Amino acid sequence: MSDKVELEEISAADFFYRNKSLAGFDNPVRATYTIVRELVENALDAAEIAERPPKVEIILKEFRGKKVGSLPWYKIVVADNGVGLGPEEIPRAFGRVFVSSKYRLVQSRGTFGLGGTMALLYGQITTSMPFKVISARLREPVYEITMNIDIKRNEPVVLDRKILKGISRSSFTIVESYFEGNYPRAKKKIVEYLHQTAIVVPYADISFLDPERNLYVFPRSTDAMPERPKESLFHPKGVDLELLQRLIESTNTRTLKSFLVRHFQRVGERTAKEVLKLAGLPPDKNPSKLTKEEISSLFHALKTYTKFLPPDPSVLSPLGADLFESGIRKELQPEFVKAVQRPPSVYEAHPFIVETAIAYGGQIRATGEIQLYRYANRIPLLYDVSSDVSYHIIKRIDWSNYGIKSPEDEPIVFFVHIVSTKVPFKTVGKEFIANVPEVAREIELGLRICARDLRLFLSRKRRKELLKRRYELFKMYYQIIAETLEELLGERPPVENLLHRLRVDIGEEYGGDNGGEEESS
C-alpha cells in the first residue's frame, strides 16, 4: 500500500458545486427561494447603480418540457431597468463564481460574488440546461447570449450569441434560467421576501407572476432614493495585523506618514504623526523597510490610540428614517411607527450604521411569537431568525418598561437594518447577523429609542381610551337622569348641553381631544 497522499485542486465553482448548502442551495425548497432572492438582488443593484428607481419583474412558471425525476422544473425570468451589460461583460459577470463588481470596500447587497452565478449554476446542475442573458445599454444594440458554466475550470461557455435588431431606447437586463425546485413549499418565503423588500426599498416597483398564475404587485411609494454609497478606506480603529501587513505590502507610498493618510479614513497628517510617535517610528520611514517588530509596534499604536474620529458616514448609504417609515406604512399600515438611524460606528476596520424601527397596531396582528424584520444592506433576512443578534436583544429587553406586556402577544413588529462595507454575517448563506458587540450595542440603543416613543404613544392611547370610557359612563347616567326628570317634571332638561360640557372637560384633560364621538343635538 502506498503512503503517498494525492492532493486535488478544484475551482471555486467546483467547490460550491460540492458544497451547495453553504450558499443556501441545500434542498429544492430553499433553492427555489434563494434563486428568486439572488436574481432580484442583482436586479435591484443594477437599477441603483443607474441611479433610477428600480423596476423589477419576476416570472416563475413550471416547465412542461422533458425532464427526469419526481420534482418539477421551473423557468424563471427576471427583468430589470438597470445599467445593462455589453457582450464582453455578460459571460464574465454570469459565468464565473467569485467574479463580481463587489470586491471593493463599498456597501453592496452582495458579499461573496456568489449569488446570481450560483443561482444559474444550480439550475445547470439540476437540469443540464443552459441559461440566457439578454441585455442592452441605452442607444446600443441588444445582445442575447446563451451559455453555461464549465464547473471544473470556473469558466463561462458561450453556446450562442445574437445581436437583436434595432437600438435599445433604454438599458435593461433579462435573465432566463431553468432549475429543479419546489415552489408550493417555497411560496410563503418568496412572497414574504418580496413583501419585506418592498418595505426596505420603498422606491422600487416589483411584480411577481408565480406558477399558480397569482400576480403580486408591490408599487413604490416614493421616487426618493438614498444616495449611492462611496468606496471606502479602512478605519484604523478596528484594523487587524493581517490587514495592516497586506496594506503595507501593496502600498506605493514612500513614507509612513503618507501611508497612514492615504490608506485609512479620517487620518490627517497630525493624527498620523501622533500614531507614529506612539509607535516609536519615524514619519519619513519607507513602509517597505519595516521589520516585523516595527509592524507590530505600528499595529499596537493603532489599537491603543484613542483620538481617531468616528468613521466617515458618507461612504455608507442608509435608508434613512423617513424612507424606512414610508415603506413600513405602505406595506403594514400600522397605527404607530417610529424609525431611528444611529450614528456611524465601526467594527474590524469597517464603518457601519444601524437603523431600527418599531411598528404597532393598525393592520398588524399579534401572532404569538416575536415579529422581527431583519435587513442587511437592504436585503431581507428570512431564515435563522432565532440565531440573529437582534432576536436575542429583543428577548432580553424588559418590554414592560415600555408599556408592552409581551412582544409575542402584542400587535408589534420590530425592524433592524444594518448597512456596512462588511456586514458581519455568520454564514455564507447571509441569513443572520453575528453577535458582534459593537453591532449589538447599536441595535439595542436604536430599539430602546423607538420603544420610548412607543411608550409615550401607548400611554396617550390608553389615557384616551380611559377618558372615552368615562365619557360613555357619564353619558349613560345623564340619559337616565334626563328621562327620570322628564317623567317627574314633564319636560326634558338640556342634557345635550351637559354632554357638550363633559366632552369639553374630557378633551381639556386629554390635551385637546374631545374624548368621544360627536353627537348631533
Image: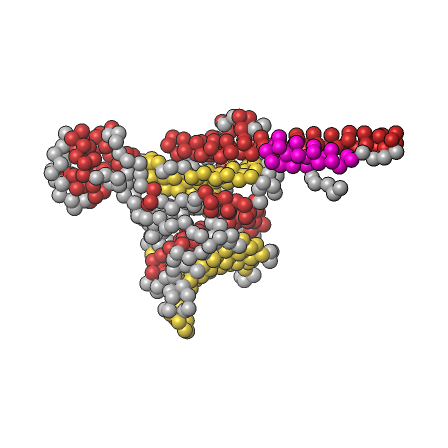
Q: Position of residue 184 (x, y in %)?
A: 58, 50
> Taking 238 as reference, is 147 left or right?
right
Q: Residue at x 43, y 31 (%)?
A: 445
Image quadrant of residue 456?
Answer: top right
> Taking 469 as reference, is 175 left or right?
left
The structure's colour scheme is: secondary structure
Image quadrant of residue 342?
Answer: top left
Residue 435 position (above or below residue 22): above
Q: Residue at x 57, y 54 (%)?
A: 216
Please state which of residues 199 and 372 is positioned toward the viewer in this rendering: 199
Evaluate whether residue 283 shows in this view.
yes
Residue 147 position (above or below residue 41): below
Majority secondary structure of magenta residues: helix
Q: Residue at x 60, y 58 (%)?
A: 213
Q: Position of residue 471 (x, y in %)?
A: 70, 32
Asked if the magenta segment contains residue 121, the reply would be no
Q: Residue at x 51, y 47 (%)?
A: 327
Q: Position of residue 19 (x, y in %)?
A: 41, 44
Please state which of residues 106 and 156 is positioned toward the viewer in this rendering: 106
* Quarter that holds the C terminus: top right
* Quarter that holds the N terminus: top left
Magenta highlight range: 494-516
> Taking 519 as reference, is 25 left or right?
left
